[in-house]
Amino acid sequence: MKHIDIADIIKSQDFVDKEVTVCGWVRTSRNSKSVAFIELNDGTSLKNIQVVVEKGDSDYKEPRVGMSLKVTGKAVAGRNNTVEINAVPENITILGDAPTDYPLQKKGHTLEFLRTIPHLRGRTNTFNAVWRVRSILASAIHEYFQSHNYVYINTPLITGSDCEGAGEMFQVTTIGYSNEYKSEEDYYANDFFGKRAGLSVSGQLEGEMAAMAMGKIYTFGPSFRAENSNTPKHLAEFWHIEPEVAFMELDDVIELAEDMLKFVIGKLLKTCPDEIAFFDAHFEKGLKARLEELISHDFGRVTYTEAIELLKKSGEDFVYPVEWGCDLQTEHERYLSEKVFKKAVFVTDYPKEIKSFYMKQNPDGKTVAAVDLLVPGVGEIIGGSEREYDLEKLLAAMKERNMNLDLYNDYIDLRKFGSVPHGGFGLGFERLIMYTTGMANIRDVILFPRTVGSIR
């Protein structure tokens, strides 16, 4: 049906004194003897538009919260440069009823309660703002890479190899539970693909293959990890941004990560001032200042070895003890970014034992050319590396981990035919949204969160 987005009317005085038609859901409704007020929101704006209803002699029935309406009326100037709509009852059409047990009757619902109604929580201010931030960040990411000659690649969601080598993959099968097969090999031989298959944990390996042809590529899509981690930072299904670039070394990876992150956060601050102000007021005081501070300075840089020494000398009573060779925990990452550097910081050159097989081995024989970006308030937000492009070194790393080389024949081939230095990183999209909104739980930045023991 023909109507005007509420966002367009709110943003412009051009509609004043003109007849407009809007559609939306009732957020609040107030009724008096001669005049009624309806706050309407159609999802295009964090702000509602007020409909002032001149009741006259009509038999006006006050709409309930949650109802959907179509309203035709005259746009008029309101207070503080706002725009309102004057309407009469005859020009208000109920499109969808909402009974008295509509779950969002009152304000102040907890996020925990709203997770029980994911199909409705988008109608609250909080999730209206979250989904808009998510959309703008996604658009900014595409804009950044497209404007820098990157090719957008769609990598497979179903794969026969485990990119991370950790085995935390969801199995893909058409057979399911069965006692008909004598062995695991027999089972998979009769399955859809003729061998074991799973949901991808990362598009990196296929992304590297594309980069060896296109030079500069990025992926942006879902990844899946069957990790039994019921924490505020983990999802079983999440979205991933993964650039892969030929002729790129570790320093280039770091430069790309910093430039990209500053661009998308700057774009968000410019495009979503109302949403950032909302999160600043209700979820994290000083959020806007923190984001502005982040993009106004060069990021810090420290090696893993130096970071371990800083942590050991800190005098902090960490839950997880710190020794060279340990994997940094969130408490360590936040201490480095919040207390030591007081800004975003890159940590480089991790022990090879705690990093993936595909990372380039450093000359010291102990570390790899890996990098993590740590940011205040969250910890790690980006993980990347220069990739190992020497065939013999790659094969040695895979054999040390007892990996089945037959599953990686295509990947190994890249090191045979015109191999070049190359690198890239992965950015967890939901963690970026958490960082830029102040939302504390990853379940609250994705439409339908998939977590351990929970799916709907």
Image (cartoon, rainbow, N blue to C red):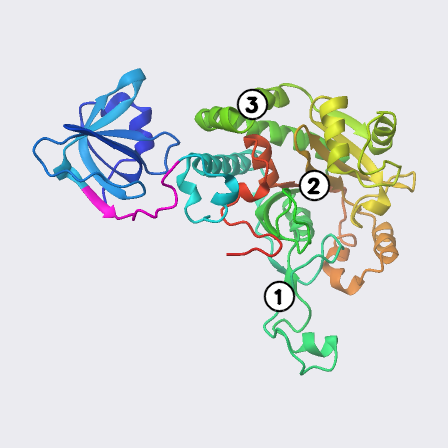
Q: Is residue 355 left or right of residue 121?
A: right
Q: Give the residue type that dot 1 points to.
A: Val
Q: Is residue 98 left or right of residue 198?
A: left
In the rendered image, residue 24, in percent from the top left (x then y), is placed at: 29, 40
Q: Given this view, does label 2 or label 3 mark the residue nearer the observer?
A: 3
Residues 442 and 56: in front is: 56
Q: Residue furthest left?
A: 57
Label 3 belongs to which residue? 285
| N-terminal-most mark, 2 or 1 | 1
Q: Is residue 421 left or right of residue 70?
A: right
Q: Which mark is residue 424?
A: 2
What residue is shown at x 61% (from left), y 22% (from top)? 295
Check disc 2 and report its element: helix, strand or loop.
Answer: strand
Q: Give the residue type that dot 2 points to.
A: Gly
Work out how far the residue at label 3 is from the one at label 1, CA to CA, in angstroms: 44 Å
Work out how far the residue at label 2 is from the one at label 3, CA to CA, in angstroms: 34 Å
Q: Which mark is residue 172?
A: 1
Q: Give the residue type that dot 3 points to.
A: Lys
| N-terminal-most mark, 3 or 1 | 1
**Magenta span covers which residues?**
93-106
